[in-house]
Image (cartoon, coloured by chain):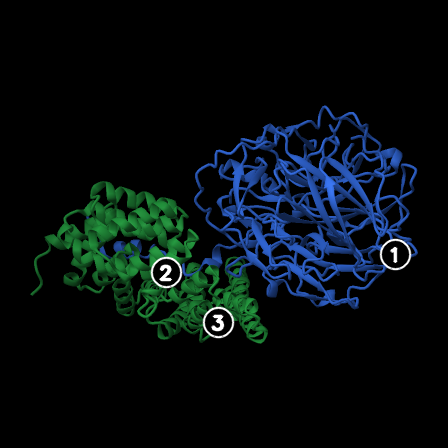
Chain colours: A green, B blue
C-alpha cells in the first residue's frame, strides 16, 4: 500500500515543481520516505513534520505524513492531513481510498462503503475490494460482502487474509462447502507464508554461521521460480551476507516476474554495483528510480553508477537530485562540485 | 576536498539492500501486532468498584519464586503460573491455593505451592505442610473440582515435568494420587492448561490437559542464538516460536479413581500441534454437551466441539476463535468467559502479548463467533503483555466488566526499551452497555494501578461481602489479594450448584440469570483466566434490580428454572432437588 502511495506522491509532485528551490523540504521528504521503507514510522513522522514546518502548504508532505500517521495508528491526525491534501490538491482516488480505510477503522461502515465503492471499479490500490468486502460484512450486508471478497480473491489470489475473510463470510452465510474451500486456500497460503519465514530464518543463520556452500544449500530451499516476493527476499538475504553472485539469479528472475517491484530492481542494481558491473547496474537502478524517485538510496547509487561509467553529463542531474534528498551527504556534494567545475565534454 | 571515482564507488557500495519483507522482522513470541485504536472521550460515569491490595495484612506474604527476576535464560522461567479460590474444607469460605516455580540453580527455601486457609476474618493461615501440598517445581496451571464425587474439591496441577492430582481426603489433607490415578506421563511434558470436564456426560469428571512446548534444558538454544531468541534486536530467552509445538491430552475418568488417556479415541490428536495455554470447558453451542476451548500462544487457538459420541472435532478456524481478524495467529494466554452483551450466550475474552490487542469474541449462541474487539473499544490498549483474564461484574451494575493482569516476560529489556517495562499495572475495561467498554487503570484503586509482573488471577468473594475480589500471582513477589470495596447500593446474587446425576461440582453447568430485561449467561468452570480457577459460586451483579429468575442447564442435560429469587444472597441449588441450605455462608 505504501509503495502504491508513492504513485500519488508522483501525482502531486507536479504541483510542487515550482518549489524545487526548497531543498530542505526535499531532504525531509526523502529521508522520511526512506525511514518509512524501513518501517521506522515515528522517525519518518518527525521528518514529515519538519517538512511541513518549512512549508505548511506542501500537499506531498501532508500526504506522506498522513500515510505515516495511519501506519502509527494515529487515525484522527491522519484524517486531518488527508483533509489538508484535499484542500491543497483536490480530490483523488487515493484520498477516497484512505478516507474509506479510516472510516472502516472507525466502525463507520456506511461511510466506508460509500468511499470505497466509489473507487472499486478503478482502484488506486489492489486491496480496495478487500476492504470494501470487510466493510460490507461488518455492516451485516453479507451478500455484497461476499461479492467484494470474491473479487478481492481474484485480484489478490495469494493473500491469505482475503481467503480467511471470505471463508468466514461463507461460514456465516451457511455456505459450508465454499467456506471449507476458502479455509483450505487460507491454510495453504498462510502455511506458505510461515514456511518462507522459517526458511528465511534458517538461510540467515546459515549465511552468518556456516560455509557459503552449506548456506547455499539451506537458502535454495526457499527458491521458488514463480514467486517474485520470495525471490527478492532470497536475493536480499544473499546480498546482505555479501554473496552477490548468488543474489543475482533470484533477483533477475524476480524482475522478470514482477517488473513493477521496486525492491527487486533496487536490489538487483545494488548487487551489480557491488560486483562492479556498472554497465549492468544502470538499467535496474534507472527502473528503481523511475518507480520511486524520492528514494535516496536508489538515486545516489544511480548517480554513482553513471559517474563510474564516465557518463558525467547523465550523472550530474541525478546526483543533484540525490543531494537535494540528502544534503548531509558530503561525498555526493564533493563529486557534484567536481562535475560542475569540469569543462563540458565535446 | 576532492574525491576519486574509485572512492565514490566504495562509498556507493555502502548502499543498503531494500527491506523486502516483514518476514525478517517477526520473531520471539509476538506473532501479531495491532496499532492501538484512538480512545473515546471519558464517559465521566462513576465506577463503584475500588480495589485495595490486602495480601500483606491477610497473611499472604511469601514470595512466589519463579525463575530469574532479572535475566531469565529459558522460557520455562517466564510463563509463570496460576492460582485458585477453593473451599477445600467446605466451610463456605474461599481458601487460596497458589502455584509456584523454582530456579535454574535449584529450589530455594520457600519455593513451594501453597494452600492458605481462610480464617473468616480477612486473614489466612498457611496450611501447606499440614495439608500435604508442599511441592516445588515449575508450576503452570491449576484446576479444581470434585473428580471422585466424594463431596470435597480436589486439585490438579500442571507443570513442566510431571503433572499432579491431589485427592482431597476430607480432613484438611490431600494425597498425591497421580500414579494410582494413571496420570503419570512416560515422557517429560510441559503441562499448561487443564480443565475438568464431563465430556461424555456419565457423571464423572474427565480431564483435559494442554501442553505448551516440547522443552528440554539440554537442547535449548541460549538467548541470542537464533532469531527465535531475539526480540526487537535484543537477545532474550528462546521460544515458543522455533520450538516444537504439542498435542494436548484428554483423560477419561473411569469412575473408580483412575483415568485412561483417550486423546486418540476422542479425536483430539487430529488437531494441529499448538503451544497450548489456558483451557476452558463450556457448552458454547448450547447443545447440552461441553466443548473445549484452548488459548494458544503464537499458533491458532483451538475449539473442540463435542460430537456427543465421545469424540470431538476441532473447529476454531471455522467458528472464528482461532485467529485475529486478519487471519494471523496471536499469543493467546488467558481466557475470560462470560456474557458481556447480555444476550444469554457465553462470549470469550482472550489476552495476548504486547503490541497486540486482546480479543473479544461475541457468540451467536450456536458457537459461531464475531470479533468484537474494535467495536467494543477493547483495541485501545496494546501496551502490556496480558495474562489473567476475567469477564466479571466488578461494580455489581449488571454489566460484566473485563479485567486483566499484565507483566512482561523480558525483564532486562526495559533498560534499553523503556516503553516495555517489566512491571505494569492491572487494567479494567468497565462495561458501559451497548457492547462498549472503557479502560480504567487509575480510577479503580491502588490495587489496580500498582505495577507488578503478574500472571494468573482468580476471581472470588473471599470475604463473603457480595462482590468480586481478585487474587493475583506476581512473579518473584508475594501475591496480591485485591479486596473489592464496592460503594453504592447495587444488588447481586450468587449461585452455587451441586450436581446430583451430574458431576457433584456441576462443572460445565450453565446458568442464565434474567433481571431487568437482561439475560446474562455464566458457566461453572474449573479453569479460566490464566491457568487459574475461580470461586465456583457464580456471581451476578444486578444493578438496582431486586429479584432475578434463573435458568439452570445441568451438565447431564436437565434444565431447571427458578423464579423471583430475592437479591443479595447466596443460593445453593441441588440438581433435581431445588434450593438447599448454604454451607457456612454467614450472610
Q: Is residue B355 left or right of residue B90?
A: left
Which chain letter goes with mark 2?
A: A
**Quarter of the N terminus of chain A within the rendering:** bottom left
Horizontal and vertical percent position of residue B122: 76, 26
> Relative to A122, is A63 above or below?
above
**Residue A218's quadrant in the figure?**
bottom right
Closer-to-camera residue (A91/B129): A91
Horizontal and vertical percent position of residue B577: 86, 49
Which callout, 2 or 3, points at the residue further toward the start of the chain? 2
Judging by the rendered image, the residue that carries numbered circle 3 is: A223
Helix, strand or loop status at disc 2: loop
> Relative to A322, is B393 above or below?
above
Judging by the rendered image, the residue that carries numbered circle 1 is: B182
Helix, strand or loop status at disc 3: loop
**Residue B6's quadrant in the figure?**
bottom left
Closer-to-camera residue (B520/A48): B520
Judging by the rendered image, the residue that carries numbered circle 2 is: A1
Amino acid at each position: 500500500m505504501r509503495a502504491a502511495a508513492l504513485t500519488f506522491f508522483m501525482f502531486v509532485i507536479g504541483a510542487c515543481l515550482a518549489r524545487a528551490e526548497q531543498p530542505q523540504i526535499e531532504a525531509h521528504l526523502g529521508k522520511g520516505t526512506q525511514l518509512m521503507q524501513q518501517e521506522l514510522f515515528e522517525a519518518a513522522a518527525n521528518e514529515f513534520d519538519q517538512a511541513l514546518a518549512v512549508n505548511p502548504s506542501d500537499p506531498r508532505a501532508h500526504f506522506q505524513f498522513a500515510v505515516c500517521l495511519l501506519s502509527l495508528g494515529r487515525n484522527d491526525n491522519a484524517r486531518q492531513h488527508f483533509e489538508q491534501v484535499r484542500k491543497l490538491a483536490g480530490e483523488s482516488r487515493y484520498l477516497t481510498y484512505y478516507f474509506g480505510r479510516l472510516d472502516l477503522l472507525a466502525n463507520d461502515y456506511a461511510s466506508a462503503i460509500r468511499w470505497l465503492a466509489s473507487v472499486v471499479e478503478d482502484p488506486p490500490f489492489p486491496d480496495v475490494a478487500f476492504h470494501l468486502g470487510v466493510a460490507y460484512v461488518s455492516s451485516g450486508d453479507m451478500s455484497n460482502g461476499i461479492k467484494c471478497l470474491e473479487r478481492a480473491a481474484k485480484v489478490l489470489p495469494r493473500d491469505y487474509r482475503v481467503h480467511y475473510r471470505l471463508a468466514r463470510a461463507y461460514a456465516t452465510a451457511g455456505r459450508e462447502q465454499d467456506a471449507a474451500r476458502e479455509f483450505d486456500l487460507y491454510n495453504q497460503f498462510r502455511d506458505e507464508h510461515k514456511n518462507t519465514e522459517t526458511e528465511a530464518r534458517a538461510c540467515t543463520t546459515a549465511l552468518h554461521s556456516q560455509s557459503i556452500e552449506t548456506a547455499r544449500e539451506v537458502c535454495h530451499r526457499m527458491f521458488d521460480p514463480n514467486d517474485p516476493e520470495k525471490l527478492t527476499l532470497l536475493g536480499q538475504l544473499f546480498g546482505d551476507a555479501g554473496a552477490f553472485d548468488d543474489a543475482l539469479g533470484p533477483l533477475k528472475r524476480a524482475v522478470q516476474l514482477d517488473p513493477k517491484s521496486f525492491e527487486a530492481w533496487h536490489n538487483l542494481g545494488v548487487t551489480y554495483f557491488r560486483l562492479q558491473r556498472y554497465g549492468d547496474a544502470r538499467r535496474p537502478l534507472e527502473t528503481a528510480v523511475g518507480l520511486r524517485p524520492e528514494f535516496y538510496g536508489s538515486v545516489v547509487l544511480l548517480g554513482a553508477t553513471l559517474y563510474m561509467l564516465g557518463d558525467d553529463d547523465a550523472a550530474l542531474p541525478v546526483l543533484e537530485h540525490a543531494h537535494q534528498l540528502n544534503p548531509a551527504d558530503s561525498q555526493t556534494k564533493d563529486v557534484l562540485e567536481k562535475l560542475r567545475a569540469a569543462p563540458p565534454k565535446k | 576536498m576532492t574525491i576519486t571515482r574509485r572512492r565514490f564507488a566504495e562509498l556507493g557500495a555502502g548502499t543498503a539492500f531494500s527491506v523486502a519483507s516483514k518476514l525478517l522482522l517477526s520473531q520471539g513470541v509476538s506473532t501479531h501486532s495491532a496499532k492501538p485504536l484512538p480512545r473515546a472521550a471519558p464517559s465521566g460515569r462513576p465506577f463503584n468498584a475500588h480495589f485495595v491490595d490486602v495480601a500483606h495484612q491477610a497473611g499472604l506474604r511469601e514470595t512466589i519464586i519463579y525463575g530469574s527476576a532479572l535475566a531469565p535464560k529459558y522460557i520455562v522461567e517466564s510463563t509463570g503460573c496460576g492460582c485458585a479460590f477453593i473451599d477445600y474444607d467446605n466451610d463456605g469460605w474461599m481458601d487460596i491455593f497458589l502455584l509456584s516455580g523454582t530456579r535454574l540453580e535449584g529450589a530455594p527455601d520457600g519455593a513451594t505451592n501453597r494452600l492458605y486457609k481462610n480464617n473468616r476474618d480477612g486473614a489466612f493461615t498457611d496450611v501447606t505442610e499440614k495439608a500435604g501440598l508442599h511441592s516445588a517445581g515449575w508450576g503452570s496451571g491449576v484446576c479444581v473440582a470434585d473428580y471422585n464425587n466424594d463431596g470435597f474439591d480436589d486439585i490438579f496441577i500442571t507443570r513442566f515435568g510431571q503433572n499432579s492430582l491431589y485427592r482431597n481426603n476430607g480432613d484438611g489433607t490431600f494425597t498425591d494420587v497421580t500414579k494410582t490415578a494413571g496420570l503419570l506421563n512416560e515422557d517429560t511434558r510441559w503441562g499448561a492448561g487443564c480443565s475438568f470436564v464431563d465430556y461424555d456426560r456419565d457423571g464423572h469428571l474427565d480431564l483435559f490437559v494442554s501442553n505448551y512446548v516440547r522443552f528440554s534444558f539440554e537442547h535449548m538454544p541460549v538467548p541470542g542464538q537464533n532469531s527465535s531468541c531475539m526480540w526487537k534486536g535484543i537477545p532474550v530467552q528462546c521460544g515458543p516460536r522455533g520450538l516444537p509445538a504439542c498435542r494436548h491430552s484428554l483423560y477419561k475418568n473411569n469412575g473408580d479413581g483412575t483415568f485412561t488417556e483417550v486423546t486418540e479415541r476422542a479425536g483430539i490428536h487430529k488437531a494441529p500441534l499448538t503451544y497450548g495455554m489456558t483451557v476452558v470447558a463450556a457448552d458454547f453451542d448450547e447443545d447440552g454437551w461441553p466443548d473445549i476451548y484452548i488459548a494458544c500462544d503464537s499458533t491458532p487457538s483451538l475449539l473442540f466441539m463435542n460430537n456427543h459420541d465421545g469424540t470431538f472435532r476441532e473447529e476454531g478456524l471455522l467458528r472464528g476463535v482461532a485467529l485475529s481478524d486478519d487471519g494471523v495467529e496471536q499469543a493467546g494466554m488467558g481466557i475470560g468467559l462470560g456474557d458481556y452483551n447480555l444476550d444469554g450466550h457465553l462470549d470469550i475474552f482472550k489476552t495476548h502479548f504486547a503490541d497486540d490487542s486482546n480479543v473479544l469474541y461475541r457468540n451467536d449462541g450456536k458457537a459461531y463467533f464475531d470479533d468484537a474487539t474494535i467495536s467494543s473499544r477493547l483495541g485501545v490498549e496494546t501496551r502490556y503483555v496480558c495474562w489473567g483474564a476475567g469477564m466479571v461484574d466488578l461494580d455489581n451494575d449488571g454489566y460484566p466488566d473485563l479485567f486483566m493482569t499484565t507483566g512482561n516476560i523480558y525483564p532486562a529489556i526495559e533498560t534499553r526499551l523503556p516503553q516495555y517495562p517489566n512491571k505494569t499495572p492491572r487494567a479494567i475495561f468497565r462495561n458501559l452497555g451497548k457492547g462498549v467498554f472503557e479502560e480504567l487503570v487509575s480510577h479503580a484503586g491502588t490495587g489496580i494501578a500498582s505495577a507488578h509482573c503478574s500472571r494468573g488471577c482468580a476471581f472470588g468473594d473471599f470475604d463473603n461481602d457480595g462482590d468480586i475480589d481478585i487474587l493475583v500471582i506476581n512473579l518473584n513477589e508475594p501475591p496480591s489479594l485485591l479486596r473489592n470495596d464496592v460503594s453504592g447500593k447495587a444488588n447481586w446474587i450468587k449461585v452455587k450448584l451441586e450436581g446430583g446425576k451430574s458431576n457433584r461440582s456441576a462443572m460445565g453447568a450453565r446458568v442464565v440469570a434474567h433481571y431487568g430485561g437482561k439475560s446474562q449467561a455464566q458457566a461453572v468452570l474449573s479453569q479460566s483466566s490464566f491457568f487459574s480457577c475461580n470461586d465456583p459460586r457464580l456471581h451476578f451483579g444486578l444493578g438496582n434490580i431486586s429479584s432475578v429468575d434463573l435458568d439452570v442447564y445441568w451438565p447431564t442435560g436437565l434444565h431447571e428454572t427458578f423464579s423471583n429469587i430475592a437479591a443479595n444472597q447466596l443460593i445453593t441449588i441441588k440438581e433435581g432437588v431445588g434450593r438447599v441450605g448454604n454451607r457456612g455462608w454467614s450472610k
